[in-house]
Amino acid sequence: MSTESRSFQSRSVALSLPPKEHWTLHHVLLHRIDRETTAEGPGVDPPPLEIFQAFETLDAGHTTFSIGQLEAMQEVLAEYHHSTSWWESERSQLERLLYNIATGLDDQRSQSQ
């Protein structure tokens, strides 16, 4: 990994999350973490370490995340956004969260160039 890439990965981004989005993100991360534990049979991979770290950060009341955590959250949120299950009622918050994370990542990428 290049020095520039490592520098980008070690940066952090503070998200401004209204209460509904904060709750939705907390709920999605917790659900993703619990999904492995409650799965019946094999086939559910554990979430990446960054999801656990992001959940702990959010659970502590903070909203500043590393680039790796944002990327992992973006992946999980996109998965839930495309789900046709009970996440339908959270779709608007999921879309706003995805937008906020993408904007934060894009801002960091443009600053590192």
Image (cartoon, rainbow, N blue to C red):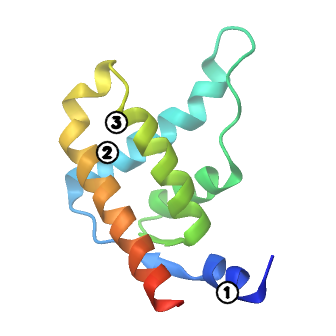
Q: Is residue 49 left or right of residue 54?
A: right
> How far apart are the alpha carbons under marks 1 and 3?
30 Å
Left or right of residue 38: residue 102: left
Label 1 sits on residue = 7
In the image: residue 45, left or right of residue 12? right
Check whether the beta carbons of the residues at disc 2 and disc 3 lie within 8 A of each other: no
Name which quarter of the figure residue 36 lies in: top right
Which residue does the image show at 71% across and 17% down from the upper left? Answer: 43
Element class at badge 3: helix
Residue positioned most to the top: 40
Number of residues whose C-alpha sits closer than 10 Å to that of mark 3, classed few (under 14), some (14–19) or many (20 or more): some
Residue 37 appears at what percent x and percent y? 66, 24
Q: Amino acid at mark 3?
A: His
Q: What type is the residue that disc 2 sits on?
A: Thr
| Residue at (31% x, 45% y) in the render | 24
Looking at the rendered image, the disc whose residue lies closer to the viewer, 2 or 3, is: 3
- Tell me how far mark 2 sits from mark 3, CA to CA: 12 Å
Q: Residue at x 37, y 25 (%)?
A: 83
Q: Nearer the viewer, mark 2 or mark 1?
A: 1
Which image quarter: residue 9? Answer: bottom right
Question: Observer-nearest residue: 36 or 108?
Answer: 108
Among numbered discs 2 and 3, the one appearing first in the sequence: 2
Which quadrant does the N terminus fall into? Answer: bottom right
Q: Position of residue 107 (x, y in %)?
A: 39, 81
Reply above or below: 29 against 88: below
The kind of residue tagged 1 is Ser
Which one is earlier in the sequence, the residue at label 1 or at label 3?
Answer: 1
Q: Where residue 111 sits in the image (x, y, percent)?
A: 46, 90
Residue under label 3, please give it: 81
Question: Where does label 2 land, which residue?
Answer: 24
Secondary structure under tag 1 reads helix
